[in-house]
Image (cartoon, helix red, strand yellow):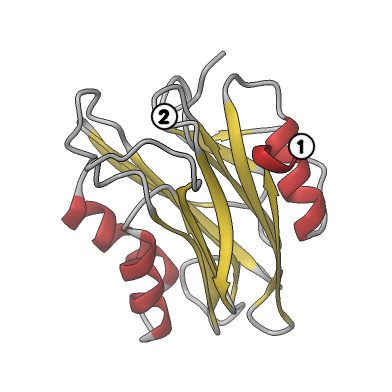
Amino acid sequence: MYLGRFVVVAPAVGAYRVSSRSFPNRKATGRQPGTVTVGPTDDAPETDNPYVEYNCLQETARGAVIGNGSHVDPIAEKLALGYPARDALAEPLLALDFEKDDYDTPRVAGIVGVDPADPSTNADGPGAVIGTVRRDALLVEEVTEPTLVATYETDSPEPVDFSAVDAAGAAREAYDMDFEHEVCAVGVSGSAVEGYATAIVNGTDE
């Protein structure tokens, strides 16, 4: 099965995976502390597609944001400014809308390790939210167990079997999930209280 790009979100661990048929020559890179970027490899053909390169992970003091496009940055900005996690996720998704490509590709995102004081969750410890915007809906939900949402097939959040408890395990497990055309994966773990760890698995290194 081909899901395209997807996120897996749980209260204290999450992952983002790029699966791609059209642009497989990409990798994830930690260009600065707390940020991971997806972009072309050195041998990738040139393209003017605006959806090929973007920050897929941004850490803040109130949660770690993961997602499949340029919406990750404004979500992180709003979260850092004090917006509740639910609103920080929903407003940029609504404003940017689905990707204007040939497939009306949904945008997907999640926030891991949300501050327990955040009103968006009922968690006693770290909380999480997940969301997507597609042509026919904007969905934002609190997460209490591992939950997946993808650009294709699984374009509504659904529970998923995901056992990783740390960033390295999350990146590896997401990359190895039995969906077609894996390219790279990023894992994140931790909380707003304890801080975050990140990890990367690139197909170019396999």
| Observer able to see residue 183 | yes
Question: Where's the N terminus, which quadrant?
Answer: top right
Image coordinates of residue 27 in percent, x first then y, are 56, 47
Q: Which mark is residue 206?
A: 1
Camera-side residue of 193 and 96:
96
Q: Nearer the viewer, residue 45 or 62?
A: 45
Mark 2 surroundings within 10 Å by alpha-carbon count, few (fewer than 14), some (14 through 19), many (20 or more): many
Q: What residue sits 22% from the left and 29% below the top?
A: 104
Q: Nearer the viewer, residue 53 or 7?
A: 53
**As drawn, is 2 to the left or to the right of 88?**
right
Residue at the spot of label 2? 155
State the image coordinates of residue 162 (x, y, percent, origin top left).
75, 39
Report whether 53 appears left or right of 178.
Answer: left
Residue at position x 29%, y 32% in the image: 105
Vertically, is 185 above or below 64? above
* Secondary structure type for disc 1: loop
Label 2 element class: loop
